[in-house]
Image: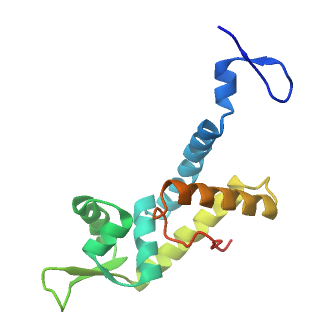
Amino acid sequence: MASQPDATSGEDVGLVEERATSEGLLLALVGQHAMRRLRAAHTEHDLSPRQFHLLGLLHDHGAMNQRDLGSRMDVDPSILVTLLNPLEAESYLSRERDTADRRRHVVRITPAGEQQLARAAQAQRHAEDELFASFTDAQRDQLRTLLLALRDQLAPNLCCTPSGAAPPR
């Protein structure tokens, strides 16, 4: 079995070594690490990443019916209910019958939910600052630009911000 020459050193590199530095595998490994850090930041504030996303959607877009919320989050209605119930129990959101269509429920973030979201968002920013502590602002901006381009190529409707928008730090 032949080895591949390394493009920078010219030395032979085995398949495992070569794949260990591939962009896809590195992205997956770094993504797992980042997800653990962000999940820890959210759970420190009694939210799962999906609950954080849900409250963020309500904060950014205002009240919406459960069907639209589930569609925006790309989750099954039964999963959405399991996300909504504990948030409602903690008074982070409210669900009320839609006056225009009594079969639907309108979901709203509450002031307590706004406060909890703000705390969790600050914890997320702190976790990201720790994660990228060795990067300059220019490097972080470059990484964000590349990741947005990749996201837009793979799933144009995946996220909740316009592709050119840089989130505040």
Q: In which quarter of the image is the C terminus?
A: bottom right
Residue farthest to the top, as pictured:
1
Position of residue 110 measured from the top left corner of the image (x, y, whole percent): 38, 83
Residue farthest to the right, as pictured:
9
Q: Quadrant of residue 122?
A: bottom right
Q: In which quarter of the image is residue 26?
A: top right
Q: Residue at x 44, y 67 (%)?
A: 53
Position of residue 117 measured from the top left corner of the image (x, y, whole percent): 49, 73
Q: Which residue is drawn at 54% across and 60% down?
A: 152
Q: Say whether residue 93 is left or right of residue 13.
A: left
Q: Is residue 47 visible?
A: yes
Q: Say whether residue 19 is left or right of residue 42.
A: right
Question: Compared with residue 79, is residue 97 higher up or lower down, i.e. above or below?
Answer: below
The image shows a total of numbered marks equal to 0
Question: Compared with residue 49, is residue 115 higher up or lower down, i.e. above or below?
Answer: below
Taking depth in this image into account, of 156 and 32 the one nearest to the observer is 156
Position of residue 18 measured from the top left corner of the image (x, y, whole percent): 69, 26
Q: Quadrant of the N terminus?
A: top right
Taking depth in this image into account, of 37 and 58 the one nearest to the observer is 58
Q: Quadrant of residue 139?
A: bottom right
Q: Which residue is drawn at 59% across and 69% down?
A: 163
Q: Residue at x 23, y 63 (%)?
A: 77
Q: Can residue 48 be seen in this view?
A: no
Taking depth in this image into account, of 165 and 49 the one nearest to the observer is 165
Question: Compared with residue 27, is residue 163 higher up or lower down, i.e. above or below?
Answer: below
Taking depth in this image into account, of 7 and 168 the one nearest to the observer is 7
Here the colouring is: rainbow
